[in-house]
């Protein structure tokens, strides 16, 4: 069975050295390839984990200048192992669309965007040119949770609760806002892949529908044309290294096997093998497992 990883990380050393968290162990491509070989992973998408490098490097433009060509070089060096995702200069609206063009020219296959940037989510008008160019070029968007000042950070700065809860709430809010803004409908050919099962979405599908129905009855919320759950079942989500069969089963019930991509979240999560075994062990058909472990990523990438 072909196994493809939809959520992996490699940080160029010239970027990693300017971060607070990613200096050690995130720039070792040999270790990454060895881990992939051990777990029998054929190829992996290299995503940006979101970091504070832009603060120390003088802005997102400087990070893009280093990061995108470095990822392209890794892909060129290992074309049968790595799939590259480029990043945008989120603090320079006038340059973002042009950077998407450059990402395409560099031979990268997708975009790696954070769920928010300084409190601005991807449904805001400033990001519309990015989404337009991504759809034009056929570049799917992999949405990683924002780890720098995620939603709720101004109230809680706990070193455990922030990554467990606030990171996931940020990606949850992003996926929900894209629905409420009509962005999914506006860009019907654009594929979104949300890390961590799109946050808490699998837990709140029932509440989304029941609350929407109640509020529509009083005209408190606009008509979406469909139940929220029906809209959200068109997005893709990745497993982000979970080893809980319950989580996979819930995602299957929520999104269906055709929308779930296995992802390791390496090196944040190092046990690739157990994460793969979790998908292999759950009650599902062989064709459904093949979709989750690689087939869906091929579909996303076109």
Image (spheres, rainbow, N blue to C red):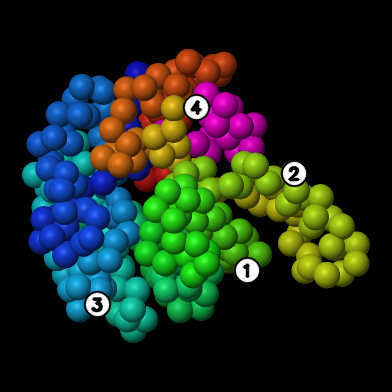
Q: Nearer the viewer, residue 286 or 199?
A: 199
Cα distance in 3D space between marks 4 and 2: 21 Å
Q: What element carries label 1?
A: loop
Marks 4, 2: nearer the viewer? 4
Q: Say which mark, if any, is on residue 244.
A: 4
Rendering coords of residue 202 (x, y %): 62, 41
Mark closer to the chain start, 1 or 3: 3
Q: Residue at x 16, y 58 (%)?
A: 16
Q: Nearer the viewer, residue 30 or 23?
A: 23
Q: In this view, does 230 lie above or below 213?
A: above
Q: Residues within 10 Å of mark 4 (few under 14, many from 20)?
A: some
Cα distance in 3D space between marks 4 and 1: 32 Å
Mark closer to the chain start, 1 or 2: 1
Q: Which residue is drawn at 44% across and 33% down?
A: 242
Q: In this view, does 197 lie above or below 141?
A: above
Magenta span contains residue 249: yes
Magenta span contains residue 206: no
Q: Say which mark, if any, is on residue 181.
A: 1
Cα distance in 3D space between marks 2 and 3: 41 Å
Q: Is mark 4 on a helix, strand or loop?
A: loop
């Amino acid at each position: 069975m072909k196994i493809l990883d939809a959520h992996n990380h490699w940080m160029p050393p010239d970027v990693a050295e300017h971060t607070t968290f990613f200096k050690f162990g995130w720039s070792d491509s040999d270790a990454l390839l060895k881990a992939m070989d051990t777990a029998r992973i054929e190829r992996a998408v290299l995503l940006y984990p979101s970091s504070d490098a832009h603060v120390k490097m003088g802005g997102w433009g400087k990070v893009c200048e280093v990061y995108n060509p470095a990822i392209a070089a890794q892909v060129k060096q290992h074309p049968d192992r790595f799939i590259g995702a480029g990043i945008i200069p989120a603090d320079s609206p006038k340059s973002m669309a042009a950077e998407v063009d450059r990402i395409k020219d560099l031979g990268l296959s997708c975009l790696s965007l954070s769920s928010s940037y300084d409190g601005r989510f991807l449904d805001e008008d400033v990001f519309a040119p990015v989404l337009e160019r991504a759809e034009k070029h056929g570049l799917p968007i992999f949405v990683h949770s924002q780890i720098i000042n995620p939603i709720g950070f101004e109230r809680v700065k706990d070193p455990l609760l922030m990554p467990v809860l606030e990171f996931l709430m940020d990606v949850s809010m992003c996926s929900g806002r894209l629905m409420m803004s009509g962005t999914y409908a506006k860009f019907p050919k654009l594929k979104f892949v949300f890390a961590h099962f799109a946050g808490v979405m699998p837990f709140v599908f029932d509440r989304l529908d029941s609350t929407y129905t109640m509020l529509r009855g009083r005209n408190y919320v606009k008509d979406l044309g469909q139940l929220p759950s029906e809209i959200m079942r068109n997005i893709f989500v990745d497993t982000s290294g979970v080893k809980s069969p319950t989580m996979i089963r819930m995602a299957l019930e929520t999104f269906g096997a055709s929308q779930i991509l296995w992802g390791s979240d390496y090196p944040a999560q190092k046990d690739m093998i157990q994460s793969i075994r979790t998908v292999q062990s759950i009650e599902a058909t062989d064709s459904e497992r093949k979709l989750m472990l690689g087939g869906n990523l091929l579909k996303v990438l076109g």
